[in-house]
Image: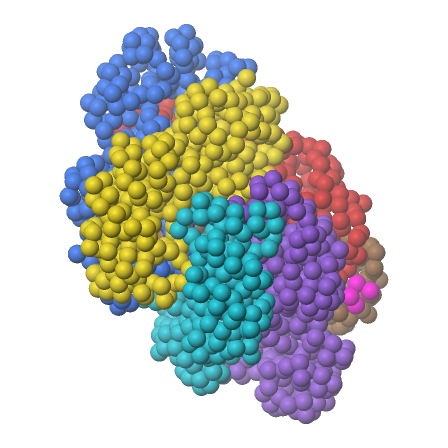
Chain colours: A brown, B red, C blue, D yellow, E cyan, F purple
Amino acid sequence: MSLSEYEPPQPVVEAAVRIALAEDLGMLGDVTSIAGVVEDSHARAVFRSRGEGVLAGTACATETFRCIDPDVAVTWRLSDGEPLSAGTEFGVVEGLTRSILAGERVALNFVGHLSGVASLTRRYVRSAHGRCRILDTRKTLPGLRALQKAAVRAGGGYNHRDSLSDAVLFKDNHLTVLGITRSVERARARWPGRMVEVECDALDQVLEAIAAGVDRVMLDNMTPEQVREAVAAVGGAAAIEVSGGITLDTVSEYAATGADFVSVGALTHSAGVLDIGLDFE
Amino acid sequence: MSLSEYEPPQPVVEAAVRIALAEDLGMLGDVTSIAGVVEDSHARAVFRSRGEGVLAGTACATETFRCIDPDVAVTWRLSDGEPLSAGTEFGVVEGLTRSILAGERVALNFVGHLSGVASLTRRYVRSAHGRCRILDTRKTLPGLRALQKAAVRAGGGYNHRDSLSDAVLFKDNHLTVLGITRSVERARARWPGRMVEVECDALDQVLEAIAAGVDRVMLDNMTPEQVREAVAAVGGAAAIEVSGGITLDTVSEYAATGADFVSVGALTHSAGVLDIGLDFE
Amino acid sequence: MSLSEYEPPQPVVEAAVRIALAEDLGMLGDVTSIAGVVEDSHARAVFRSRGEGVLAGTACATETFRCIDPDVAVTWRLSDGEPLSAGTEFGVVEGLTRSILAGERVALNFVGHLSGVASLTRRYVRSAHGRCRILDTRKTLPGLRALQKAAVRAGGGYNHRDSLSDAVLFKDNHLTVLGITRSVERARARWPGRMVEVECDALDQVLEAIAAGVDRVMLDNMTPEQVREAVAAVGGAAAIEVSGGITLDTVSEYAATGADFVSVGALTHSAGVLDIGLDFE
Amino acid sequence: MSLSEYEPPQPVVEAAVRIALAEDLGMLGDVTSIAGVVEDSHARAVFRSRGEGVLAGTACATETFRCIDPDVAVTWRLSDGEPLSAGTEFGVVEGLTRSILAGERVALNFVGHLSGVASLTRRYVRSAHGRCRILDTRKTLPGLRALQKAAVRAGGGYNHRDSLSDAVLFKDNHLTVLGITRSVERARARWPGRMVEVECDALDQVLEAIAAGVDRVMLDNMTPEQVREAVAAVGGAAAIEVSGGITLDTVSEYAATGADFVSVGALTHSAGVLDIGLDFE
Amino acid sequence: MSLSEYEPPQPVVEAAVRIALAEDLGMLGDVTSIAGVVEDSHARAVFRSRGEGVLAGTACATETFRCIDPDVAVTWRLSDGEPLSAGTEFGVVEGLTRSILAGERVALNFVGHLSGVASLTRRYVRSAHGRCRILDTRKTLPGLRALQKAAVRAGGGYNHRDSLSDAVLFKDNHLTVLGITRSVERARARWPGRMVEVECDALDQVLEAIAAGVDRVMLDNMTPEQVREAVAAVGGAAAIEVSGGITLDTVSEYAATGADFVSVGALTHSAGVLDIGLDFE
Amino acid sequence: MSLSEYEPPQPVVEAAVRIALAEDLGMLGDVTSIAGVVEDSHARAVFRSRGEGVLAGTACATETFRCIDPDVAVTWRLSDGEPLSAGTEFGVVEGLTRSILAGERVALNFVGHLSGVASLTRRYVRSAHGRCRILDTRKTLPGLRALQKAAVRAGGGYNHRDSLSDAVLFKDNHLTVLGITRSVERARARWPGRMVEVECDALDQVLEAIAAGVDRVMLDNMTPEQVREAVAAVGGAAAIEVSGGITLDTVSEYAATGADFVSVGALTHSAGVLDIGLDFE
């Protein structure tokens, strides 16, 4: 077993798989296999990509089969983070046919969704041409955050804060009373060692945030032109994150502004599935 | 409190919200609000749609705030299943500013994702022009199935089986040994009162399934022309479900074939978020 | 490991065993063994039936010992669903004496209760002489439904719906406003692919239900004579389930009426234990 | 809210109800009510006993409805431990019809089973004519122990040890190596303040146990005559518990022997349901 | 695997470790190792005591590594309850460096705290010079009771009651209405087989408690002189427990009074950590 | 309800209290109160400090009583973070006597331990005379981390990283292969926006870390003299944390060196309880 940078912690996998299996097996288990498949039948099935993308979620698939039947053998030819093309065979499952069929859908739901996240991330990363880094957000699907954040890494992206505990990020609604300077000061005082970032809609806010000594400014809903201007004004005094509705079409333009990061909620809230099948031989 | 057909069971909501809050609050809670927002500040914020679609997930948002701070008041102007346009204000949250900010992201993640599922469903439903019904599948996101299935109903869709326990659905891999006729017979014997369906790639399979007395046939990856032919051959002896890569572009054509159902994995595995904000006043 | 039709899904077993062990081990574990049994003592003990019946629950017993001490070896000579007589030795446990004693009661509680359910089911099945099938109900013991439903299958019975989600079953209290015809119509519209059943107290209700196109009628608290009359009236247009206080004394008479199913709450709400011991050698 | 001696701790109730509701509501909730009952319909329903017995489990029923819909009002006319006859109305539920129907089965499963345990206990207690006390055992149904033990108290019985941690009870299998005297000595040394009891099959064992200073002897599978002899031999030096297959027919005879306790596994492993209905008005 | 008297039940360990790992791994796992340690690097590390004390908590450490990565091998040279000196190497961990580092802190937190409890207990035990036994209390740290009670045993102490269910212990607040005699009588009647103890502040209470037939009296906040007087007055009619702010300085004096037990809340509420390291080789 | 900076997130409190109540109520609940306290007796009890310190844990106490009996009223005169002296009455509980007694120990275990953590923190803070800030560590008690970290804040301390996910902190064992410079570089690349810190034993390491651009250096087990030298060498280029066995006796000396932070494992691994009582009136 490896602890790869592209995989979530194993206890998270263990818990997520149990919830997913409870959903899918229900009270009776796989009634179809019981009716249609002879009890001692064995099978071998291959995970095969039907599209192009990046693999993620293998640890969840392994755990799915292990939890249903520890005698099922799962072996991976590729690891999370590796590229897939249509037709790529990246894993093999062998064991009782009923056991494989009982786990198939859950395993595919994990691998398909998480590879979808990784693959969409990779597309943003490619479109950024190495000029800036792609970040995820807290706009994740409930219960799947740790898994999705690992998938973002598998796709070549980087993780923004995990949770509200993780870093200070002031937005409009936080700043109405105390303003940027005083809020940043209080954040530094209260939460040493945590990044302090301020969301800015306009250049004067950026300048106030920089003067207050933030680690990063988030330029929200600005045009590439405005971003470029802000980058120049900041002059390296803080990292710059650009955010707000940036798409695959526009990411390249933003990446070229000199900003350090583009953060993209879509990576985790709107990634479609990567089409993956489990083909029986 | 209502038990609407468009909402998931309350105990499911209770559990899902606790998992999501554990993810998002982390160890310390909302460090940003603690730094930037005065402890006794109160606020009022409005849920506002920024796009067009269908509302879903309100029960999760209510529970989110209730769990963080029971003194927060959440009131809904619209219910799950009702249409949203850009600018529609559909709910109000009032209470301590810190409490609202602490729950904002989790509430939005639920409402945004589930409204996204409902909205995509509604688009398929509209494209089918009432000629057939749109079904979901078991291709759901792990841990979110009950919530997603309620959102599909909110969007005007219908639920296929919940879990492997719920109905018998023979696919290729189940039929290699025993074949259709004998498998259906065994399913009827073992699982009375459960729907029996067979996935068919070709007309002869359809005919064998009908002869075996199935409740429904699933026509997989057929052209509209092939579907029409199968519909004629079945002649009402079983319900007909069409499946396999049907998109918003093609659903209309399939809906016109006379099939009863089109099932669409994308409703739950690839719905993008509906953009919704919580705007402070 | 097998996925037999007589066993519950493994994740259900895993969860149920953990709850039962938490109850029985308490804070300190088995204080008696610690006081009376030498730490490195080994033992071999045999599961032996002290009465006649049907075996069920072996997966729970296996998991019980596995969870306390993975070095305990549990081997089964018989599987769930097989007959037991007084004296039948059907399993062997070997390992540290303390480990076996620590798991003994929990393992026996599972096997004794579930074999009790299976055994009572078998008696009903035998009394029906193959003329109709015996169904369970939702009158199960809280927390044990999936296990009990597997035990019913082990005893030769069949499963009615799992949960309120699983099928539509209109009773008196559902029909007061909308009546049978309209309720059935709504059920078909809302929940395609799910069985629709109506509970009927009188023949006119049966006829209305049949006309409405239900899948099954439940004849509640009718005499065998009334059932026979209803069977004739239905004429095969729907399946017929008889229910309401049917006992081992009366099941044979009801089974002879031509009804398809007799459902018996007692299988799961009132099955006594099958007396089983774990005899040390 | 009261903390009656006949009720389990509230946190246990809270957890048990959530498990039971997850089983019964499934993914979709009550599909029947959604189809057949108008959303804003209200109802009033009465818990009514259809047989004679003792009430138990009301806290679970209250929690069931509270968890589904906090607006449902549940009021009890009788409390756990009070007698029921056929026709006794002991509680009222008022609220949305859908909410009541959604909780009906789970509430009845708790109340019916636990009242069944209480009622069977009461029958043993009555048959003992106050000459000895009736004890439960650890032969409980997995996951329901705390609830069942409260029901035994509601029926007039007493609780033996809760778990393996709770008291020392040497049986045959514990005594093979060290024997009674030394085992008791070790138990006293290791576990001060916990009852030490020895299961005895013969008078010489009883005498050895008494000499070793046990708190209680369990006379296992002895005839009333043998028990009487042992009672005389013990002469008050320890409490005496009689156990082993004692039935409602034989309990009176054993109670008359002078033993202090009769313990009955059947109270919790084989109590049938008490037939209780929730009648809509 | 052994079931030692010094270890908690394995299911308790399993649950506690999962909670602790969820706390410490967070969303991303060990970000430091991912950055600094090559993925396939292996290591061997030794558990080494940096102080003098008693070992406890090894089962938790084993489970910690097993849960992160089953391929990590953990072997113990010493068992819970054995003495440690500064420099003692008592266990070895071998496997992937990242896996060892990911579990290091959680394993040390368990072993350090529980060895701290065991070590403090041992100091009290030694100071009592075998004249009385040292008991723990219910003043434990939330969520850690079973683990702490095992550690107390490992240190040579004994366990008082586990929970409020476990024994009757009347204190001032219980006795205001009914008084000692009647309360004890009611306790005997309601809870046969459970120890009944009364907390006494003065000799007349002790005498009343003895007359009422209690199993044990707790002498609360008395001087050694008062205890000696009470011991004489009791004359062996009940066990005597001394409690109330007894420290390592005073325990010897109390132990010499003839009391049977000294109970010490500090064992579990105020034990400092035993300094233990995991040294990489 | 407030979301104070000195309190943990409410969902964490909810979960921790349920675990603690399951431990302390056991199967039967408070057997002592059932025996000794009349069912409808009411009481009023006051939380009173018996020593000097800082209050923490009130949210856990509130939740404890709410979970046992929602009719118990808990009101606080002081909040977490406020000072306590011997005799300070800081809260009142009113309700059924049995309900109060059932929750007393759990409430006190939370408040006593967490106030102990806050109080010890306050002592370190005072000894530092405002010259540096006191930090906690990950050396927390398993399952209590979020609660302990809030208590540290209540005591005037600051939180170091929450979990392994939260910040990069290279120690010896991480640096053996790649060394400081390259490890820091990799950390910056992999985990943008997270603090990077390096533990240093010697000045050359400090200089290398500074050159590598770390946010903070941890000076481990250095003398105050060595720290002063390092502070001078760093010259404000990074924050400086001092760690390693710093006690109440030595903290003042370290605080005077010019270091920014002193981190103290003892705050959470070795804080004794603050003696607090719940006095009935």
Query: Does residue D119 appear in the picture of this structure?
Result: yes
Examine the structure image and report whether residue A185 is included in the region drawn in magenta.
Answer: yes
Residue at 25% in and 60% down: D180
Residue at 19% in and 38% down: C51
Q: Nearer the viewer, residue B121 or A229?
A: B121
Which secondary structure class fits the magenta region best? Answer: helix
In the rendered view, would you say A46 is above or below B263?
Answer: below
Q: Position of residue B225 (x, y in %)?
A: 42, 28
Query: Does residue C276 appear in the picture of this structure?
Result: no
Q: Nearer the viewer, residue F127 or D235?
A: D235
In the rendered view, would you say F139 is above or below C278?
Answer: below
Q: Position of residue B78 (x, y in %)?
A: 69, 32
Q: Position of residue E250 (x, y in %)?
A: 55, 77
In the rendered view, would you say B15 is above or below C139?
Answer: below
Residue A66 lies in quadrant? bottom left
Total residue callouts = 0
Q: Nearer the viewer, residue F122 or F25?
A: F25
In the rendered view, would you say C6 is above or below C26?
Answer: above
Residue at 40% in and 45% down: D159
- The answer to whether residue F67 is left or right of residue C243 is right
Range drawn in magenta: A182-186
Residue at 66% in and 56% down: F279
In what quadrant of the picture does the C terminus of chain E appear?
Answer: bottom left
Q: Nearer the viewer, residue C25 or B254?
A: C25
In what quadrant of the picture does the N terminus of chain E appear?
Answer: bottom left
Q: Position of residue A185 (x, y in %)?
A: 79, 68
Examine the structure image and report whether residue F89 is included in the region drawn in magenta.
Answer: no
